[in-house]
Image: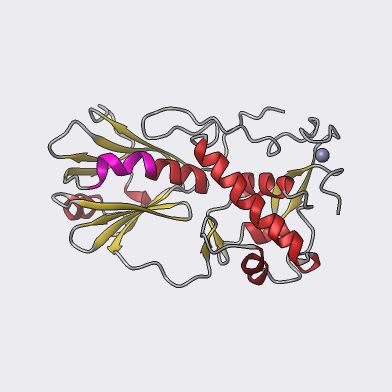
Amino acid sequence: MSGSSPSMPELPEAEVTRRGLAPVVEGARIEQAVCTQPGRILRPAKDAAGFAATLAGRTVTSVERRGKHLLFALDDGTALDFGFGLWAEVLLVEAPPAELRGAALTFAGGPWTLCFGALALSSFRLGPHTPQPDPPPFDALDARLDGGLLGSLARPAVGLKAFLMDDRRLLGLGNGYSDEILWTARLHPRRLAGSLDDARWGELAGALRDVLTTAIAAGGEEAFLDPSGAPGRFSRPIHHHAGEPCPRCGHPLAGLVAGKRETDFCPACQAL
Ligand SMILES: [Zn+2]
């Protein structure tokens, strides 16, 4: 098995993208907006002309992240919401590509075009820039998420893998990072949330933060490109490595289905 299989962008990749875009895009005025895949526009639905007309002339005031969505706040009180979906490449280039497949925002006064390409279930949505609603769901990097708060979000009878990926409770985690977080915390993916004591919830909250901040510091996972086109350096130790030795104890990693998703884990150090 190879660790190089592409995986869905999750919270770390969205945050790396936000950090790469913000210095260039914040305060910049959109000269032209183009979308050649109107099916990706959810609002105004499938309307590439409306997308172009609404964005042209607007200034981006800030780039925010909610889970694995980016919000480009605009100077008229609206925002462009971009969801990464299954896959997307968000790149800052000096000249727009001759053949665009996706969407591009060209900024005035500089050489920069922001290109959204390789879109797979990605989405664009234009609408009012609303304040973040009261949680839950909590962003998985919310500073308030200690063990006690994390534990209070989970229904007792839900498995931990399903809980971490439940976007009604936590935003930004998908299949890959959930496996890494549970391995780091030495918790079985199917273990029921109700079986954890306060200390174990504290360990899970710590693992959640450690894995996400480590992945962000590494520029995201290896198959991912940051806005400058540089690949990430975070090598997932567990996800897609079933059959290989556990990096911690040497026991062969195994796969199962948890939370309806293919899940990899170490049967020895994540015993049920
Ligand atoms: Zn192990």
Residue 43, image x, y percentages: 31, 60
Point out the stretch of residues depicted in magenta. Answer: 19-26
Residue 184 to residue 195: above or below: above
> Ligand 1: which quarter?
top right
Q: How many marks?
A: 0
Relative height, residue 124 to residue 232 (above, below): below
Work out whether residue 87 or residue 9 is closer to the camera in this orientation and state it.
9
Q: Identify the residue at horizontal 21%, vertical 55% (top origin).
A: 50
Question: Residue 168's quadrant in the figure?
Answer: bottom right
Q: Is residue 1 left or right of residue 127?
A: right
Q: Position of residue 212 (x, y in %)?
A: 56, 46
Q: Looking at the image, which residue is at 36% across and 30% down?
A: 228
> Measuring 19% from the left and 44% from the top, which residue is drawn there?
28
- Residue 159: in sight, yes or no? no
Q: Main secondary structure of the magenta part?
A: helix
Residue at 83%, 44% in the rendered image:
269
Reply yes or no: does residue 163 show up in magenta: no
Residue 188 vs residue 124, the one in the foreground: 188
